[in-house]
Amino acid sequence: MKFKIIYEISWALMTARLKQTMVAAVGVTFSITMFITLLSFMGGLNNMLDNLILNRTPHIRLYNEILPSKVQPIDQSLDYRNNYNIIRSIKPKKEQLQIHNSLAILDALKKDVRVIGISPKMTVNMFYNVGGVGLSGMINGIDVMEESRLFTFEDYVIEGKAIDLKNTPNSIILGVGAAENMLAKVGDVIQITTISGTTFPLKVVGLFQSGISDLDKVQSYSSLGTAQKLMGKSNDYVTDIQIKLKDMSEAPQMAKEYGAIFGCQAIDIQTANSQFETGSSIRSLISYAVGITLLIVAGFGIYNILNMMIYEKMDTIAILKATGFSGMDVNRVFMTIALTIGVIGGFAGLVFGFGMSVIISHIPFETAALPTVKTYPILFNPKFYMIGAIFSIITTYLAGYFPSKKASRIDPVDIIRGK
């Protein structure tokens, strides 16, 4: 019964100063709305950027890097073994970029239960022939089916079909930048020259756009068989093996394991993209900092409004205490006011924040740099709404605690004497 009376008194005080109460509630609503919208947008942006990287990046990449030998002949000589030998301008051994025993490695990886899929790859450095000019370029020979399944290759083919690489002999999917430089269209036949000086005609079956213009001026794709034919290599010649795992977090440990077992270099996605992950973390941290700052500012607004209400309602507080209400009861009255503002304003903020996020997610956003993105990215994560609701309660609780504590200590006799 007593709690009902306290709530009725709190409601009467709030409605008596309705404009001030509404200003405080609107402050909380605006803060929560911007908090939800900002985090949802930044989360969507991070997800979009992560997907652009993660969808096109293997969890583990096996390759054969040409490096100078760490052990030099002079170090193996008995006469100089105990000396400190300094050798300058060490040249690497005459080795190929080919991964040795690639077929056996692919077979072993297919049997590993931790692996989702494997996509072999071969890189061919060459020149696009444009009249009498040779433009430098690079062809990636890929397993079309696996590249599409594991790395969403077909999503970036803006003209033609990815599967045509497999179905059409001696075909190529050009980067849009390279196609523009050569004025080439789908269906045209272009000439390329390998670094060994051999010229090949290739049919353009599609255009590819990665979103990085400098890369699209150089990079193109062909089937793995076509790339091997360009270099005059056998069907076991590959320069990269791209691996997708069931659990990406295991990539660093498995990269070391594969490097030791297969005798080649292995790099994991975390190492390859460490700077990118740092950028995503910093963007998220900034979003949380800005959102929490908005809530704290709203809390100060509630604090000021409750302070003013206490000064204006000194007579009311004196009457409550004179009629038998304790300091704790007065404290509860003002805490109820603060929490009511927080709950109503917070709930409205969650609703408006969701509405703003939905509106933004439907705004068209089309750019040549990001061919797979059609609208502004938004992440609808329930965690954001839980954090917003909790912070709205905590902020308004703290904003109401100190003024209500002050009101509970007011002596009604001093107020009456003052009057």
Image (cartoon, helix red, strand yellow):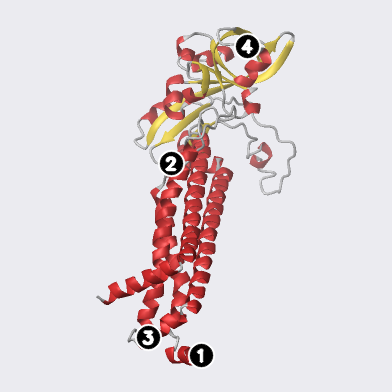
Compare residues 364 and 231 and report the one nearer the observer: 364
Q: Is label 4 in a helix, a strand or a loop?
A: loop
Residue hosting label 1: 418
| Closer to the eye: label 4 or 1 | 1
Asked whether residue 337 is in view, the answer is yes
Q: Earlier in the sequence, mark 2 or mark 3?
A: 2
Camera-nearest label, 2 or 4? 4
Q: x, y percentage for residue 234?
A: 51, 15
Report the Cα–Cα distance between label 1 and label 3.
16 Å
Which residue in the protein does label 2 denote? 248
**Amino acid type at mark 2:** Met
Q: Earlier in the sequence, mark 3 or mark 4?
A: 4
For badge 4, the amino acid type reads Ala
Q: CA distance from mark 1 to mark 2?
A: 72 Å
Q: Which residue is mark 3?
A: 321
Residue 406 in percent (x, y) is at 47, 81
Q: Is residue 334 left or right of residue 63?
A: left
- Alpha-carbon distance for marks 3 and 4? 88 Å
Residue appearing at x 48%, y 9% in the figure: 168
Q: Which mark is residue 184?
A: 4
Q: Nearer the viewer, mark 3 or mark 4?
A: 3
Q: Residue, x 39% and y 49% (percent of image)?
A: 382
Q: How many marks?
A: 4
